[in-house]
Image: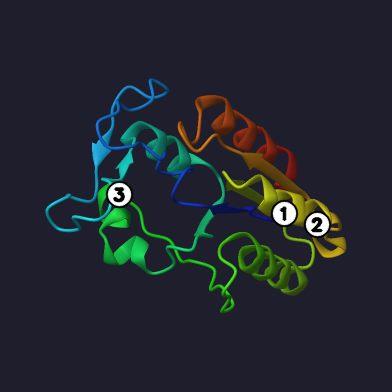
């Protein structure tokens, strides 16, 4: 059976960018804080929805973080807080930031896995533009979901992922 891989970005996707003092988006019923401002005074608190994470955890896909957070996902307690841990795709060193190294890492993974289907969920439109222009990526069954960084993953994104997983799982 072919199980798709679900590549998840963290900030702006799994955890929406919520400026200090603003309310969380009304997309999910509950939100919890991961980073406490007293521990990291220069960072805004990071919020996630346990409901969203339960739905993601129920998808028939292997979850992998594809984020510049890399191991910080575990170091900062996000994996423990959301109730599941998953590996992260290592990123090549880059001075240019998130989109290019993430795209190169995913292309490298697609070359090795050749026909394994995947889903990429990210808030960076440039990242998905790079993937859409990749000959390697275009040869693999995939679903690209772009989130709004202010609200993150929506219930309709979960449904799109569920439908994609059902369409690519074979015996």
Residue 15 falls in image quadrant: top left
Q: Does 134 appear above or below 20?
A: below
Which residue was labeled with disc 3? 83
**SS under mark 3:** loop
Report x, y in % for residue 112: 73, 74
Q: Sort mark 1 into few (<14), some (14-19) or many (20+) by Cα contacts within 10 Å.
A: many
Residue 125 falls in image quadrant: top right
How far apart marks 3 and 2 lie (CA) works out to 30 Å
Instruction: Give yes or no for contact between labels 2 and 1 (Cβ–Cβ under 8 Å).
Output: yes
**SS under mark 2:** loop
Left or right: where does residue 89 sit relative to residue 160?
A: left
- Look at the image and tell me in which quarter the N terminus lies: bottom right
First in sequence, mark 2 or 1: give its number: 1
Foreground of the two, 133 or 2: 133
Which residue was labeled with disc 1? 117
First in sequence, mark 1 or 3: give its number: 3
Which residue appears at 58% of the width and 75% of the height?
Answer: 94
Which residue was labeled with disc 2? 140
Q: Residue furthest left?
A: 38
Left or right: where does residue 18 sit relative to residue 97?
A: left
Which residue appears at 68% of the width and 63% of the height?
Answer: 103
Foreground of the two, 8 or 91: 91
Q: Residue 132: which disc?
A: none
Q: Sort mark 2 into few (<14), some (14-19) or many (20+) by Cα contacts within 10 Å.
A: some
Foreground of the two, 108 or 126: 126
Report x, y in % for residue 37: 17, 50
**SS under mark 1:** loop
Q: Does 117 appear above or below 161?
A: below
Q: Residue furthest bottom?
A: 93
Residue 25 falls in image quadrant: top left
């Amino acid at each position: 059976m072919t199980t798709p891989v679900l590549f998840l970005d963290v900030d702006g996707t799994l955890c929406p960018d919520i400026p200090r003092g603003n309310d969380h988006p009304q997309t999910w019923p509950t939100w919890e804080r991961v980073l406490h401002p007293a521990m990291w005074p220069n960072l805004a608190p990071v919020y996630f929805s346990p409901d969203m994470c339960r739905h993601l955890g129920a998808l028939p896909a292997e979850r992998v973080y594809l984020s510049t957070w890399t191991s910080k996902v575990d170091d900062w307690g996000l994996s423990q807080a959301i109730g599941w841990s998953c590996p992260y795709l290592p990123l090549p060193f880059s001075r240019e930031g998130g989109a290019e190294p993430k795209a190169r890492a995913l292309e490298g993974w697609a070359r090795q896995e050749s026909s394994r289907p995947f889903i990429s969920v990210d808030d960076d439109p440039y990242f998905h533009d790079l993937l859409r222009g990749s000959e390697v990526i275009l040869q693999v069954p995939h679903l690209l979901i772009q989130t709004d960084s202010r609200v993150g993953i929506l219930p309709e994104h979960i449904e799109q992922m569920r439908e994609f997983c059902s369409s690519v799982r074979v015996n």
